[in-house]
Amino acid sequence: MDKFNIAIDGPAGAGKSTAARLVAQRLGFIYVDTGAMYRAVTWKALSLGLRPDQTDAIAAMADSMELEILPGANGQIVLVDGRDVTEEIRSAAVTSNVSAVSQIPEVRARLVGMQKRMADEKGVVMDGRDIGTQVLPNAEVKVFLTASVKARAARRFEEIKLKQPNITLEQVEQDQAERDRMDQEREVSPLRRASDAVLLDATELNPEQVAERILEISRASSGKGA
Ligand code: DC
């Protein structure tokens, strides 16, 4: 089977990562979670004591830091300057600062360049916010995955409640709405559906069903897919 690229965009909590990972497994493709790359830059900025509004310092840091994304058994492994930060980039501190850091144009330029190179050889399932519009505008398959605010908050809440036992569903819903707003309203590469992306609503679907629909879309839109 020929290799091709699949771009999956959408708001936080729509289930992009799980579905993208399943699709990649089914096709034998490489899964790239670009949100993790913005989280890695944010993690390093915070670990150096930088605030998100120190944009020049963060831009310089992002330019010189070593960032590696490796395929692992349960998804991707993220290394910053050789250190495995796969778990740490999911912390509450990183989550609440990542939207601001991801608005810095130099940070985006560095990461988008890396992402384009990762997809050069094809056979990549990449998820994020600007994959179909900016990173892989020529991807053979583009999906915009969304779900109701309530469904997305419920999913995130399930993911984080063990790590953050004091958090409430209402808090998650509020944080998510704020993050959506920042991702959609920012000047550089805002979250929006590419005109040629297929809209998929995951409100009533489980991750396996979402993955199956993406495989169907792949078969239909490019004559490809398992
Ligand atoms: O998918 P996630 O929640 O891990 O993404 C973290 C943040 O990174 C999110 O607030 C938006 C940003 N992001 C982005 O700006 N562009 C991408 N391609 C992926 C993520």
Image (tube, rainbow, N blue to C red):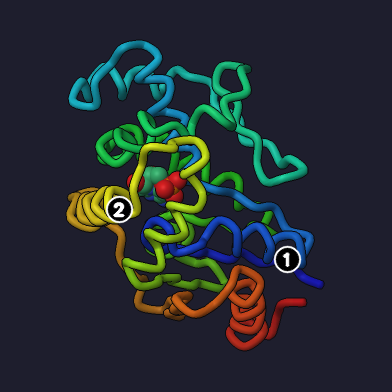
Neighbor class of circle 2 (other Cα within 10 Å; few <14, some 14-19, many 20+) is many
Q: Indicate the position of residue 34 as horizontal and vertical percent values.
A: 49, 46
Tell me where residue 224 sits by quadrant: bottom right
Residue contact between numbered discs 1 and 2, judged by CB atoms under 8 Å: no
Q: Residue at x 57, y 31 (%)?
A: 87
Name the residue carrying label 1: 3
Of 38 and 134, the residue lying toward us: 38
Q: Residue at x 60, y 58 (%)?
A: 18
Q: Residue at x 64, y 84 (%)?
A: 216
Under mark 1, the amino acid is: Lys
Picture quarter with the N terminus: bottom right
Relative to 115, does residue 51 appear above or below in the rendering? Answer: above
Left or right position of 10 against 50: right
Image coordinates for residue 140, horizontal then vertical, percent:
57, 72
Asked whether the viewer can see residue 189, the reply is no
* Residue 137 in the figure: left or right of residue 174: right
Residue 206 visible: yes
Left or right relative to 86: residue 182: left
Residue 181, image x, y percentages: 20, 55
Q: How far apart are the alpha carbons under marks 1 and 2?
A: 35 Å
- The correct choice, above or below, for 86 with respect to 76 in the image is above
Q: Which residue sits at x=49%, y=80%?
A: 204
Crowding at mark 1 (Cα within 10 Å: few <14, some 14-19, many 20+): some
Q: In screen coordinates, is 100 left or right of 213?
A: left
Q: Position of residue 121 (x, y in %)?
A: 68, 53
Q: Amino acid at mark 2?
A: Gln
Q: Is residue 111 above or below residue 13?
A: above
Residue farthest bottom in this picture: 220
What residue is disc 2 on? 176
Instruction: Report helix, strand or loop for mark 2.
Output: helix
Nearer to us of marks 1 and 2 is 2
